Image: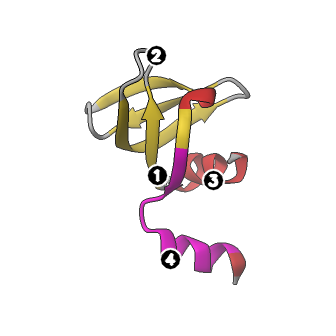
Amino acid sequence: MDRLLNRSVEDSLKLEMVYQAHNGLITQRTISVKSYNEIQLIAFCHYRNQNRLFRRDRILSLFPLHRQKVINDLYN
């Protein structure tokens, strides 16, 4: 996950995230990561149109918005 988060910060890569809120609500969001650490990340949420704080332990899934291009770039 760190490699993907770092790529989002460095290259302004948009990510798709499935996230479970504290109340159990599960949402899928497009985010652009601004910074992160072991516990949380700060990202611009394109769903809410604002910067948000997300706990890493509540991220259920995280992948590049344009998955195939990024996979090719990472492994070629």
Q: Which mark is residue 15?
A: 1
Q: Say above or below: 28 vs 35.
A: below
Q: Which residue is mark 2?
A: 22
Q: Residue at (61%, 30%) from the top-left corner?
A: 56
Say few, some or many: other residues with alpha carbon within 10 Å of mark 4 (under 14 / 14 to 19 / 20 or more): few
What are the residue bounds of the magenta stretch? 61-74
Would residue 46 be counted in the magenta stretch?
A: no
Q: Quadrant of residue 72?
A: bottom right
| Residue highlighted by disc 3 | 4
State which tag comes first along the sequence, 3 or 2.
3
The span from disc 3 to disc 1 (Cα, nearest Å) is: 9 Å
Q: Residue at x 38, y 27 (%)?
A: 51
Spatial separation of the CA atoms under disc 2 and disc 1? 21 Å
**Residue type of the residue flagged with mark 3:** Leu
- Residue positioned 42% across, 60% down in the render: 65
Q: Nearer the viewer, mark 4 or mark 2?
A: 2
Closer to the chain start, of discs 4 and 1, is 1
Q: Residues within 10 Å of mark 1 (few under 14, many from 20)?
A: many
